[in-house]
Amino acid sequence: MGISNSIKNWSEDERPREKMLQKSAAALTDAELLAILISSGTKEKSALDLARDILGLAHNNLQELGKLSISELKKTKGIGEARAITIAAALEIGRRRQISEGLQRSTISKSADAAEIVVPLLQDLNHEAFYVIYLNQSSKVLRYEPISNGGLTATVADIRMILKNALLYNANRIIVAHNHPSGNKQASAADKELTNKLKDAAELMDIKLLDHLIVSGAGYLSMADEGLII
């Protein structure tokens, strides 16, 4: 009996795998891909049903899914610790792949290049965090690192620490980024004030602030592109 006929005898849990073998990963729905990670269902529900329940928890939004913690994933009946960890690990691999693509660039020449590095780091966080990308004179990335993690609505960036590290890494240029968990990617008055202070302090040390990116679930805003860094 051929594959096309035998698929009728496969359980619902196994059919997303069969579909992936016959076609490709791109042909699967979000729920079907998630069902493959879940692997098997329960007495009451198939893996596909469980996948749909988890997506419902995330309002059928993959960005929202990426924000769910292991404990939040376990709120779905039938999803224990092992399955929750598997899903969280797969989401983390996706983030790291996005970051690695950004780091493969020899230089950063525009805001979109920097966004490839910081958006995966920041867009799924439920609290504010502040990152710095350190570059040399040719705008090649030397290093990137978090400077601070704040609460639900605000974080504090230590300008002295940013510039101290820039000197330590022999960086001539820097790009900073932080997220807005609220989803609003517009620069606040506090964002503008911090950016101007950092720019002025960096100039005294012959270090150039190239950009300040504000990341949200809706994308990112480049303060340089918006003409907010003069």
Image (spheres, rainbow, N blue to C red):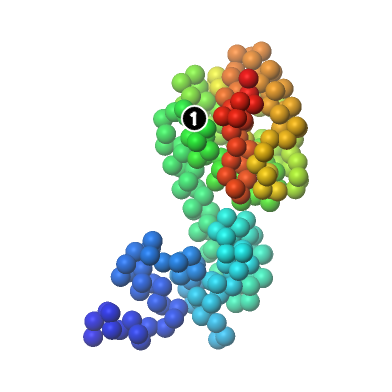
Which residue is at 48% across, 35% downward?
Answer: 113
Q: Is residue 211 visible?
A: no
Within 10 angstroms of label 1, few (less than 14), some, or many (20 or more) residues?
A: few
In this rendering, the count of numbered labels is: 1
The spot of residue 64 in percent (x, y) is 61, 58
Corner quadrant of residue 220: top right
**Which residue is tagged 1?**
110
Q: Which three-letter amino acid code belongs to the residue tagged 1?
A: Lys
The spot of residue 52 in percent (x, y) is 55, 72
Which residue is at 53% across, 54% downward?
Answer: 92
Corner quadrant of residue 24: bottom left
Q: Is residue 23 left or right of residue 137?
A: left
Residue 18 drawn above or below residue 174: below
Question: Which quadrant would the C terminus be assigned to in this image?
Answer: top right
Question: Which quadrant would the N terminus be assigned to in this image?
Answer: bottom left
Which residue is at 68% across, 27% downward?
Answer: 195
Residue at the far left: name it.
1
The spot of residue 170 in percent (x, y) is 55, 20
Residue at the far front: name it.
226
Residue 124 drawn above or below residue 212: below
Classify mark 1: helix, strand or loop: loop
User: Which is nearer the eye, 156 or 229?
Assistant: 229
Q: Is residue 94 visible?
A: yes
The spot of residue 97 in percent (x, y) is 46, 48
